[in-house]
Amino acid sequence: MSSLQTLDIQRRSATTTASPSVRTHIEVAKLIDISKCIGCKACQSACMEWNDVRDEIGTNVGVYDNPPDLSDKSWTVMRFTEHETEAGRLEWLIRKDGCMHCADPGCLKACPAPGAIVQYANGIVDFIEENCIGCGSCVTGCPFNVPRISKADNKAYKCTLCSDRVSVGLEPACVKSCPTGAITFGSKEAMKDHAAERIVDLKERGYANAGLYDPQGVGGTHVMYVLQHADTPHVYAGLPDDPRISPLVSLWKGVMKPLALAAMGAAALAGFFHYVTVGPNDADADDDDGHAGGAPGGSAGKGAKPGAAAQPPAPR
Amino acid sequence: MLKTARIERYAPGERVNHWIIAITFVLAALSGLSLFHPSMFWLSNLFGGGPWTRILHPFIGAVMAAAFCVIAVRFWHHNVLEAVDWQWLRQWRDVLANREDRLPRIGRYNAGQKALFWVMVGCMAALLVSGVVFWRPWFAYYFPIDLVRLASLAHALAAAVLIIGIIVHVYAAIWTKGSIGAMVRGTVSARWAAKHHPAWLDEKMKQG
């Protein structure tokens, strides 16, 4: 995706000043109601078609997951889980995996290339591949294991939440294609309200732990799930229970950056001022070769500690 | 002893080895810094842009690490810390104030040089190992994501320590006149040796 004139930018990777942000935007969200998903993969097809990406034909790996994982060309995949409840019932949990569009995106935090990752003011996190340098830091930063580096061009790819469609007032392609209404799109507030109604319904039907997945560890997400078992998100093919940016990444991309630069600058300045105050240590400029080269009457004698002068001068 | 006598400190092979490390270090540091902090990203222009910086940096680092291995094997036995080194370190105020006459008689390297040598050994090893772990597109896929995260942090930390160490190393060479000549032309004056490394001079004299 390229930069979109019609969408203002809230955050921009490796950028320390404000991005264009004068327009008023409402926060958007995609809501995926897992209890309504039938696993038809129409959304996968619509995603490929709209974005003009065609993954290679793979092989059957023994489960319905096809392709078996996200890739540079498959930005969303259905993950099928055969889940046995405590009551001994079998449930087929089908989760549409893809970018969660975090409010606090680990990919954007980790990215070293200015403008390769942006977060639009409406909450969509987008990769701008023309600025991507292919280092893979977004993979390192993502708590959901979403970005994929293309083997063809060494650029990172993931779901754009159809930012190009959203910017002109259309819903994402996956939403448009969903035959059961399991995927809905709108303002984040409207999606939360819609989810609340669904959760009431699910609870009435016996799913006591039904709830909304909008993990606060990453500041909330702009792709949310309605889960029948919101107390155990991990049963949905390893959806993280409490996703957050790894503290290792926070250290690396947080305090470490200014501290390391300050320490380097301080070391260089300390050297310069040492030279300015103490002067060179020049053996060949000495008047006699038995005495050290501190400037006579300079700082050489001032700081001398009587007790420290235990060693005799070097004999000739 | 002749005041004007020149004493060989570094053989031609050692000087070439040193300068290969120095050149690759500067390139690795500039390209690494460009990816470390947004304010430094402009340095990536020196390498042909962001993607080229990402491509070149690990290869430059690999050459640096290989050349450093050679010099580390050559020099480690000169850098074993001895009793006299601890005395030198305790008198760091005399060192900084140019009161070299009060310091113990030191050999080929003083304690500061030795300590820096071992810091560099540690940093180079850490940089090499951690760098391989998240070197894309070649090796990163073989390692679990938490190890990649740890390696990324360790790489940046080791690089910062190494860069600060090299700033000290370069400043010491500028401060102690005659040291740069030792690494460029290979020789030092007898007075330089007598003032900074008297015990090493004694050894040299014994060898004739």
Image (cartoon, coloured by chain):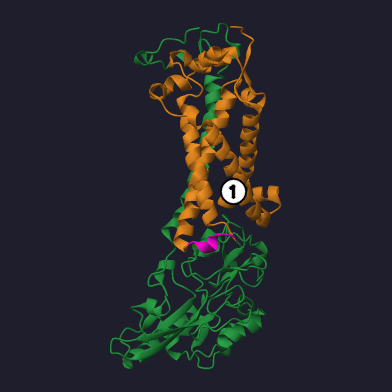
Is B150 above or below relative to A198?
above
Q: Residue furthest front?
A: B207
Q: Position of residue A244 (x, y in %)?
A: 42, 65
Left or right for A205, reference A149: left
Identify the hue of chain A: green
- The answer to whether residue A263 of the structure is visible from this angle is no
Q: Residue at x 30, y 90 (%)?
A: A88
Is A159 above or below relative to A43?
above
Binning the other alpha carbons within 10 Å of mark 1 as few (below 14), some (14 to 19) or many (20 upward) gives many
Identify the hue of chain B: orange
- The answer to whether residue A282 of the structure is visible from this angle is yes
Q: Which residues are magenta?
A: B138-143
Q: Position of residue B183 (x, y in %)?
A: 63, 26
Q: Residue at x 50, y 62 (%)?
A: A141
Q: Residue furthest right?
A: B48
Q: Position of residue A160 (x, y in %)?
A: 59, 74
Left or right for B173, reference B114: right
**Secondary structure under badge 1?**
helix
Q: Quadrant of the N terminus of chain A?
A: bottom right
Is A226 above or below relative to B122?
below
User: In terms of depth relative to the viewer, which is nearer, A228 or A314?
Assistant: A314
Q: Position of residue B78 (x, y in %)?
A: 49, 27
User: Splitting the image into 4 quarters, where does residue A196 fall?
Assistant: bottom left
Which chain contains the residue that carries disc 1? B
Q: Is residue B63 within the magenta segment?
A: no
User: Splitting the image into 4 quarters, where does residue A74 fall?
Assistant: bottom right
- Residue under pointer 1: B32
Q: Residue at x 40, y 67 (%)?
A: A217
Q: Is residue B142 within the magenta segment?
A: yes
